[in-house]
Image (spheres, coloured by chain):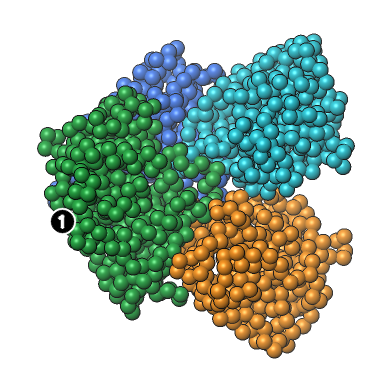
Chain colours: A green, B orange, C blue, D cyan
Amino acid sequence: MSQSRLRVGILGATGTVGQRFIVLLQNHPQFEITHLGASERSAGQTYKKIVRWKLSQSMPEDIGGLTVTLCDPAHFEGCSLVFSALDSSVAGPVEDAFARAGMAVFSNAKDHRMDPDVPILIPFCNPDHLDIIPHQQKSRGLTGNGYIITNANCASTGLVVALKPLQDAFGIDKVIVFTMQAVSGAGYPGVPSLDIYDNVVPYISGEEDKLHVEPRKILGRVDGGDTFVDYDVTLSAMCNRVPVIDGHTECVSIKLNKTATLEEVQKALKEFKPKLPALPSMPPVSLQLFEESDRPQPRLDRDLGRGYTVAVGGVRKCNVLDFKFTLLSHNCVIGAAGGSILNAELALVRGYLK
Amino acid sequence: MSQSRLRVGILGATGTVGQRFIVLLQNHPQFEITHLGASERSAGQTYKKIVRWKLSQSMPEDIGGLTVTLCDPAHFEGCSLVFSALDSSVAGPVEDAFARAGMAVFSNAKDHRMDPDVPILIPFCNPDHLDIIPHQQKSRGLTGNGYIITNANCASTGLVVALKPLQDAFGIDKVIVFTMQAVSGAGYPGVPSLDIYDNVVPYISGEEDKLHVEPRKILGRVDGGDTFVDYDVTLSAMCNRVPVIDGHTECVSIKLNKTATLEEVQKALKEFKPKLPALPSMPPVSLQLFEESDRPQPRLDRDLGRGYTVAVGGVRKCNVLDFKFTLLSHNCVIGAAGGSILNAELALVRGYLK
Amino acid sequence: MSQSRLRVGILGATGTVGQRFIVLLQNHPQFEITHLGASERSAGQTYKKIVRWKLSQSMPEDIGGLTVTLCDPAHFEGCSLVFSALDSSVAGPVEDAFARAGMAVFSNAKDHRMDPDVPILIPFCNPDHLDIIPHQQKSRGLTGNGYIITNANCASTGLVVALKPLQDAFGIDKVIVFTMQAVSGAGYPGVPSLDIYDNVVPYISGEEDKLHVEPRKILGRVDGGDTFVDYDVTLSAMCNRVPVIDGHTECVSIKLNKTATLEEVQKALKEFKPKLPALPSMPPVSLQLFEESDRPQPRLDRDLGRGYTVAVGGVRKCNVLDFKFTLLSHNCVIGAAGGSILNAELALVRGYLK
Amino acid sequence: MSQSRLRVGILGATGTVGQRFIVLLQNHPQFEITHLGASERSAGQTYKKIVRWKLSQSMPEDIGGLTVTLCDPAHFEGCSLVFSALDSSVAGPVEDAFARAGMAVFSNAKDHRMDPDVPILIPFCNPDHLDIIPHQQKSRGLTGNGYIITNANCASTGLVVALKPLQDAFGIDKVIVFTMQAVSGAGYPGVPSLDIYDNVVPYISGEEDKLHVEPRKILGRVDGGDTFVDYDVTLSAMCNRVPVIDGHTECVSIKLNKTATLEEVQKALKEFKPKLPALPSMPPVSLQLFEESDRPQPRLDRDLGRGYTVAVGGVRKCNVLDFKFTLLSHNCVIGAAGGSILNAELALVRGYLK
């Protein structure tokens, strides 16, 4: 099987998002990890020797034996695409270099998200944002598979998946969102135990700003093949870190553009089907609606659809805006590595990867 | 000292709120615990023998030796007042019986909170609601110290303390509040560890309704000595249980009645001083305003003012309403037992206790 | 496939161990769950309606639709065997009744463990203890599949799997074992969060006694087909509950019967292979030896071999006895439901189930 | 009051142990903090500005205003003594420099613990080890208050306090100790939350070795005023990190030098009184013996005696050695900063500080 699969590199392979890419791509029918990039400290050694593995799933044997290289396109010959789990402090120029070298870059970093020719792609919501790629390649002089596609901030991802069916059915005017985010969102070593055990930290640097702007771009449209037009919705976010390992929970109040009953809102959420071809990592259900008032819960529901499903529950009337509900998404799967994998699968089926 | 102190009983003395009363009243200059009431299972035995002590402060030696009785006024002779830590499933009629027997009842239970002649008293906010007591006694035919004063739901308490200075300065139109509540709020055994460890539960039975109505009564006024007039504010709450032992954190967005700058809002919070005489349990500061964006945090700040201080931080503009901020209150002290103690201290200084 | 599978009932199906049986038996090639037994409160209703599902794996759809009955053999017609997840307060006579009705009983309860004709079966360690069954049937007058097989206490299980290779190679004289046990071991609601969050409880009722006697029986032999002869080893246990969801960690110091080098001890552990035919639920490795000094760890290693593998690490010399090491086992899988499933699989392949 | 108090400096004042010194010395009758030392990064700024305060007790106002200096004796003029909370990577030579400058050094670092002329002082156990100081000063050519006194590793401290009464009464031959240590023992940022949440780490670098040697020195004697003679006891330790914030729990099995009954062992523990003059920070009880089998527990008992009391419980026979029990000590108070403060108080009363 390996010969027919596209060769794939992981940038930032030793971090927790890099590790998640490795687990999620194990036995993937279309992609085969052949290259691992990390920092100078790790380069030249086998992955198994230098990684501090932090996932409960075991490290795949074959990956452990790969030799880690620097994140330089020269070391990634033969790769069709790379998944970038790089820290935003270094991601920007490295990702540019890989795109210029003709490799598709599927990035978790924030650096290029707001570039006017780079999509924040969430296949459940805005698969047509792929249409910007020809323009991006032309304007940047990129060739082959050379282009950059980002996924959204982990908290933005769950939010827009829950908002999308409501946008389609009623239009959305205003959103107030409160988050309770898992510690795995901060990577490793990330959040010190003394900061979060028996505690809540009501602040995550830069997070609220991302929630104010990313959903507007994601829920917007591509105009004339070369311009993103934001969706006109006003968002206000309050972000908190809580003592949960995986799974971001968000409480959302929304004001719609037109009157709707509670039943109509629940129906729109329940019947949501993304407009997508079959993709290998697609979960059976993109958005699962719970009728129990005390769900979703991260420990019980974050692994729905192997972490690719967004869960919504507790839909009810809001006294101040129109409706409110709770959503949950696995911040490391659909909100990070898994989201990028879906993006690459979509790019492949749409003919953007060879 | 003991002879000049008022004799006090604790109803529901074996539960975690009952334990908290015992710790907070240790060495109190005005009140002396002389009676402990609990259920049939415990009656007739020494407190030390039957209590499952769950606080990190040690049980006072002298209290451990008291014999527990049933919660029947006949067993509480000589008490001027009782603090009720009874479960709401039984509190209502028991509290009525104590009031009829001429003892003041300071209750944590919800049963009488919305009675039209019973105040929800929070001295930092509405000390004048005590003025309803003569009317309550008259209408119910109560004599001596016989009356009922409740404190608010633990999540309502922190909220109204933070809202009060903003109500005074600008008026408040709308409030969206999202809570992250500690497990101690559910008592003992309360929340099973399998339900909350590495988890968030986005639902607390009945809690949101309390947050929708109690603040309106607390922030309202007493009209003509016999009628509560609600404050006209619309609230919407989303309540969550999080893995924190003590301390309720709440994220709040508000719409004011008149335009204000961020500086004016911060100033109103910072300069808030309750209109109160000196009370033994009053903290140095009722509302502490943090300038750091990542505070307050429950583990670091719940013990401010020995748990009697409400902390507010992260005050900033809200894109959807006007302003937003985070607040923290110790749900077992100012939000429960401590709040009742302040109420009794205020009743004493105002001449309602003999 | 379903027609060729044996029909299986679960006793105590609504508890957390019952739920674990349901998840582990999903798509099992030999066993098909057809009956669910629970208490009077649940009987007559569909499983989906009355269970409080607490596992992160979803409840299988088909099981959710089954109607729950009382744990009476009359309701389990057509079952070849039952798995008992009953609480020990009721398990004894109920299990007897099922055995008398000709159904094999694979039990997690302690009630029959020390019966002189009932094996505590752990296929990795003592598969030949099955040889007692004919004697058990004869002495109790049981027919058909009617007999009782127990598995060990969850903490005993991991311990004996780690001891077995050392017993085989060197003989074991003395064992001191300290446990750090997960909260899931106490079922649901089980351990209150106020008891275990930010805490350790240095006591689990009855647990140390089980660790003193069960390993002696398990590591012993069946003499003449009708008598268990204990293995002559002295054990001392100190049991603790720690804030971990799943996975019992145990620190062990041992004195061997003959001199051994550290390398010989590590080799015995590393090369351990149970003397077993292929069983559907057998993990690739029964005992995994870690060379890293900081492993095994429950969050990282409890799911090895889908929870059927016991992990050992940190093997080193002991200044007081001979050697010491750390072991980890998934208390709900190999230490409970999974252990029983292995027992039934072994009974089937050995011809004890039809 | 301040004029009659000795002036005190804190080395490593910004770390969590430094913060603990500051809280514990607030309002101390004999010592007044006048100098704070930290690294180059912090020097020259006010303490309030650069510290990341991590304790639930508020930072004392007056300390917040002090200007931090480098840890150079030249900046500590007028100090009689310094408390060293320095990391062991730098503590050794810095502490030497302060001693040479005539200041008494009370150190938490391990660097000098095993020096043949430096005591590991625990006033409850070995107050006479102070007698080595004249020899230390002479052999090192130190003058004035110049000398170094260390306290023990946090896990050693609790252990030797529990062993001391048994050593006195029966003599101790062998000890097996298994620890469950709090995350605060690793300082800040210390243990990443991803490493310890829902987890146990069965390894703490270098810790077991300390437990093998420090108790032998502490329980030993000073011979001829110039030589430490170890106590002849063999120890074996297994150290674990658990998800607890403060408080080290240890399970201990011991073999005594002579036969004793359980009652005699309990009596020795219960009646233990250190041979000490009154010291300001002495707790009412040095060693508290619990009769309940499930105590001590860190959340409930770590603050006994304001963290200066060591708690012991669950004393029972051991099948392998003689007796076993559980002990708990507050690793940041009696096991770290508080231990050093007691040492300084003892040095003062014994005439070693002016």
Can I make out residue C121 in this image?
A: no
Residue visible at 60% across and 55% down? B291
> Can you say whether B139 is above or below D334 in the image?
below
Camera-nearest residue between A146 and B133: A146
Tag 1, which chain?
A
Residue D19 falls left or right of residue A277: right
Can I make out residue C238 in this image?
A: yes
Residue visible at 76% across and 15% down? D136
Residue visible at 54% across and 49% down? A198
Residue C5 falls left or right of residue B284: left
Residue C200 falls left or right of residue D117: left
- The quadrant of the picture occupied by the C terminus of chain B is bottom right
> Can you say whether A149 is above or below D133 in the image?
below
Q: On the image, which quarter does residue B91 sit in?
A: bottom right
- The quadrant of the picture occupied by the N terminus of chain B is bottom right
Residue visible at 54% across and 38% down? D189
> Can you say whether B97 is above or below B18 in the image?
below
Q: Which residue is mark 1?
A: A277
Q: Position of residue B312 (x, y in %)?
A: 60, 60
Camera-nearest residue between A184 and C233: A184
Q: Amino acid at mark 1?
A: Pro
Q: Position of residue D13 (x, y in %)?
A: 67, 35
Camera-nearest residue between C306 and C104: C306
Q: Position of residue A184 (x, y in %)?
A: 41, 45
Say which element carries label 1: loop
Q: On the image, which quarter does residue A251 sit in?
A: bottom left
